[in-house]
Image: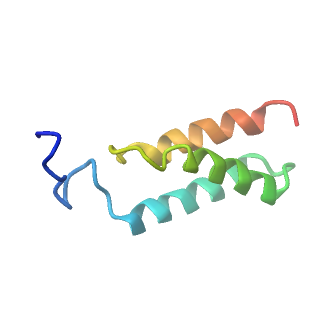
Amino acid sequence: MPANMPARPDSPTAPSPELEHDAIGLVKQRLRRRYPDVAPERVGAAVDGAYHRFDHSRVRTFVPILVEHEAREELAGPA
């Protein structure tokens, strides 16, 4: 697809914002279960911080997966 051509709404690079938001919510739930000894606020902050690093990404398909990976690395590291 040419750079100046917008992505189709049904394109894998353009999931709906609602679906992406729901996926990020599921990431938070999974990480809260995975790290029960970590304060839920810290889990949320790790996910939100990772999510915001992708604010300007054009391809959105794998953003929730990448966010989960980054947040998991942060939460597994030293406090």
* Residue at the image point whose x is 72% and y is 46% from the top: 34
* Residue at the image point whose x is 11% and y is 39% from the top: 2
In the image, residue 25 sits, relative to residue 27, either above or below, namely below
Q: Position of residue 19 (x, y in %)?
A: 40, 64
Q: Residue furthest front?
A: 4
The one of 34 and 4 positioned closer to us in this rendering: 4
* Residue at the image point whose x is 68% and y is 32% from the top: 73
Q: Position of residue 40 (x, y in %)?
A: 79, 59
* Residue at the image point whose x is 16% and y is 57% from the top: 8
Q: Position of residue 26 (x, y in %)?
A: 56, 59
User: How many numbered marks, from 0 up?
Assistant: 0
In the image, residue 31 sits, relative to residue 21, either above or below, namely above
Quadrant the N terminus occupies:
top left
The one of 45 and 30 positioned closer to us in this rendering: 45
Q: Residue furthest bottom?
A: 18
Q: Position of residue 28 (x, y in %)?
A: 64, 56
- Residue 45 placement, left or right of 15: right
- Residue 42 placement, left or right of 56: right
